[in-house]
Amino acid sequence: MMKSLIVQSRKHYRRFYRLVALAVILMTAVLTGSLLLGDSVRGTLVQRVSERLGKTETIITSGTGFMSETLTQQPLLKHAKGYLLMDGFVSVDEKLLPVYVWGTDDDALSPGEVMVNDPLYTKLSTLNSQFSIFNSQFSTLVLHLPTHNLVPSGSLFVSKSYATQMRVQVVGVKPVEDGGNLLLKNEQTLPLNIFVNRKYLAEKMELEGKINMILSDEMIDEEELATCWAPEYSGLHITDTTLTYDGVFIPQDIVAKSQISTFSSAKPNLKSQTIYLSYFVNDLIHQSDTIPYSFVTAVNEWQGEPLDGQDIILSDYASERLHVHEGDSIHMSYFITKQLKNLDTSEQTMRVKQIVPLSAFQDDSLLMADFPGLTRVEKCTDWDSDLPIDMNRVHQEDEDFWHAYRQTPKAIVSYEAVKSDWSNAFGNATAMRFTPQTSTFSSAEPNLKSQISYRIFSTLGLPRKLTPSDANVQLYHPRAQGLKGAKGGVDFASLFLSLGFFIILSAILLMKNPLVELFTLRRSEIQLYQQLGFKDKDIRKGLFREAFSVIFLASPLGVIAGLAYSSLTLWLLGNVWSGATHTEGFALHIQPLTLLTGWIVALLISAITLWFVVRNILNPQPSYRIFSTLGLPRNFSHHPPADHHPDSPQFHFLPQHGAVHCLWTFMGMRLGTFSPYEGRASIRSIHRWHDESHPTYMDFHPCIHEATPTGLLDTFPGCLHGFCRGIEPS
Amino acid sequence: MKMIELENITKRFADGQRSLTVLNHLSLRVEEGEFIAITGESGVGKTTLLNILGTLLPADEGQYLMRGEKVEVNDKKPTERICHLRNKEIGFVYQDHRLLPQFTVLQNILLPTLATQTASTEEERKRALDLLEFMGILSLKDNPVAQLSGGEQTRVGICRALINRPSILLADEPTGQLDAANAQTIAELFQRVNTQFHTTIIMATHSAEMAKVAQKTYVLEDGDLRLEV
């Protein structure tokens, strides 16, 4: 029977419970929605990691250099694939789109055919409405590629201009699950990928047999990689006596580790070690004679003799042009790069130590480094470099020299004198030579290469061979990094809970106010229960059950509303607010535990709020406390007993009492001490006892009639005015 | 043994600096099964006296005995005994009926039975129907109370007050809002309740006609009771 009474009460007072239900739905929606947002953002970012990495567990890169494609034939890398990855541009409808160009052996792409990923396809379709992979006429693109070559593009002598163009045809869209959204950077924005036949790309870039990226589906660590890696894979060429590098500039670490500072104590077979550093100088000047734009090589020793200080050994060709003799001074000026890649000019004054035939320089091939753009051209005027070369200064005799001798240096200088100016971030030598004590090795002598490796590290106390990282080969596990980044970013759940805090607070008030009003309205009913002998705790329990049943029934609707709220917010995050998130296409990830948590927390907050309201409803009426303080009758009620007469001593109001009552009722309502219902009812009670002999009441007439919460706000000045009037002597 | 004994009951109400004494060393003795009426002018304190008798208000001075046992009421949480008295020993009929609009007639009558249990027993339900029949309104048992007339609501109020077979029935102006004919009917009903159920009845009224049905009439004036001969 109690249950049916609760149901009937709920139905009878549904007007109030509708507001309570609305508040509960709102609070549950914000709570659950915020938690779902956190899960969804995190889930989307984790999903993006999977999308952009595919099954890749290990990435091996060569930095700015390249590796040999034969490295992928090693057993350790049998589940790995080699790629040639570079940045490029696609021109579409007179616009340039930056893209990632993946030279791949997958997909059976013929030369000239490419596949794009979905974001790029969408972008191309947006820029060119006629673009379609089904129509060969409208699926052709022009791909612009940088002049990637073996020499890093950031080095001084290599042009950075995008010099390679390829006309390609888009034959398909690579789906996400096949690695279409492959991206190695930890970014949330979807990449624009274009997949090209690797061999075709290498051929166009003059990088045949080269890769710069290996992606493996297995976890490989550095020690394992070191077991299958050899310097040749990274373009290091170590013969019995020489060390050169495909990227021209040998990394400083390798140069340092290859140098034996005290080789005499290590029982070497080495007579000497020579470091070469070739450079392109602007001028060789002696008095009024100048040779523009020459190759000069710095060495630490020449023909067994150290070359130091400001010594320069000129070729006979140079000495004739400059009219110099041994002992003369000549100036050498050259470009250098300072901080922020600013180009500057430096000069050195050298002393001619020796003049040798040019042929002596020609005999040593290590003196002539191969700078692409500078050395592989027919004429001086064909030099292609970012250096500001003034071709007006190149005369016929320079062209004649170039035609005959190409990049043969006209002089060699001391390595120590120029190494700080001529070294760069990519290396500080262009070659090294190790001259053995004897011209041939005995059969008992181990291979010199092994000797070098062994002695380098035993002398320095490092018991290991040259490692991949020495050659700038890096290995990392992107999935762990990516997942860490995806999971460790901004906690959107906390963010949106914070943003939604005031909504939740408003919902609590929205729930509390109608409950207070309802239970105040039913105060006489509650008093009846007390008078019928119901215990206070049973009364509270009954009221709690009645209201909580509404909360319980409304909360699942709040969970559903929360789903809608989070879906809408995710759409906004990925579209309207994508500039702030730098991520597109957030997906809703629903975790049952999250829904349950949001629901339970909302129920708890609602229950606590309800408990406070119910607990307070049986406390003495606050109006009694206020009125007794003011000296008004203690048992004043808006339901006066039937035998009450307005003129009876208990309830005879003086004007100032009425004015104060109005004022206090207003204040009480504003402060939340009484509900609006109680306030309005009490003011109406005064109105029933309105006495025309008390003009003060007339002043409150508008106040009384406008006794709504907002109305009272407007009539507060009236109440105050009346209060002031009320205290005037009558 | 007296059913009710009030000795030197005093009740004051604070009015700022002033204090208003409503009941001033009032004494009253009511025998078991007696039907008394308390009359007086409006605002003289009849409801206050009834509230004290009904354990709804504490007296400032004096003592209240029921069947020789002291009844102690305070302002704070009612004790178990007080709840028991209110539920089992005392029935209250209000001038404004205090029927709950969300329940039917029968549900209103059975309300006091739910103070100590979650559902009324069959016996209680039968008793409620008997009371409705006694009052002549059995046909209205499933009606919402808002549809009843004043007289019918008063009868329902009386049924509710009697459902737990209280020893004492307190009625505060039960016919105050009724016309003369209905008031007379109600008066006779009270007489029948007193006669048939031997319930001690204390009725507050300002109607002399109403007071006639009682065995004794007291006049409350100046805070004290005077037996009217």
Image (spheres, coloured by chain):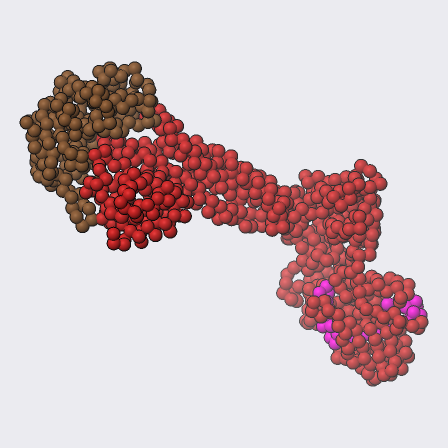
Q: Is residue A616 magenta?
A: no
What is the quadrant of residue A325 in the picture?
A: bottom right
Look at the image and give the residue range highlighted in magenta. A398-427
Asked if residue A200 can be seen in this view, the reply is: no
The chain drawn brown is chain what? B
Q: Is residue A368 above or below residue A587?
A: below
**Left or right position of A402 against A312:** right
The chain drawn red is chain what? A
Where in the figure is residue A308, as x and y percent of width and height? 75, 78
Where in the figure is residue A376, as x and y percent of width and height? 87, 62
Q: What is the quadrant of the N terminus of chain A in the image?
A: top left
What is the quadrant of residue A110 in the picture?
A: top right
Q: Nearer the viewer, residue A21 or A493?
A: A21
**Left or right position of A372 against A508:** right
Q: Nearer the viewer, residue A406 or A652?
A: A652
Q: Is residue B159 above or below residue A109?
A: above
Q: Residue at x 39, y 28 (%)?
A: A11
Q: Is residue A426 magenta?
A: yes
> Outermost residue, front direction?
A693
What is the quadrant of residue B64 in the picture?
A: top left
Number of marks in the rendered image: 0
Asked if residue A63 can be seen in this view, the reply is: yes
Q: Is residue A59 above or below residue A399?
A: above
Q: Residue at x 73, y 69 (%)?
A: A342
Q: Nearer the viewer, residue A197 or B100?
A: B100
Where in the figure is residue A335, as x and y percent of width and height? 78, 71
Q: Residue at x 15, y 17 (%)?
A: B196
> Outermost residue, bottom direction?
A327
Q: Nearer the viewer, residue A529 or A300?
A: A529
Where in the figure is residue A521, as x and y percent of width and height? 33, 35
Q: Residue at x 21, y 34 (%)?
A: A643
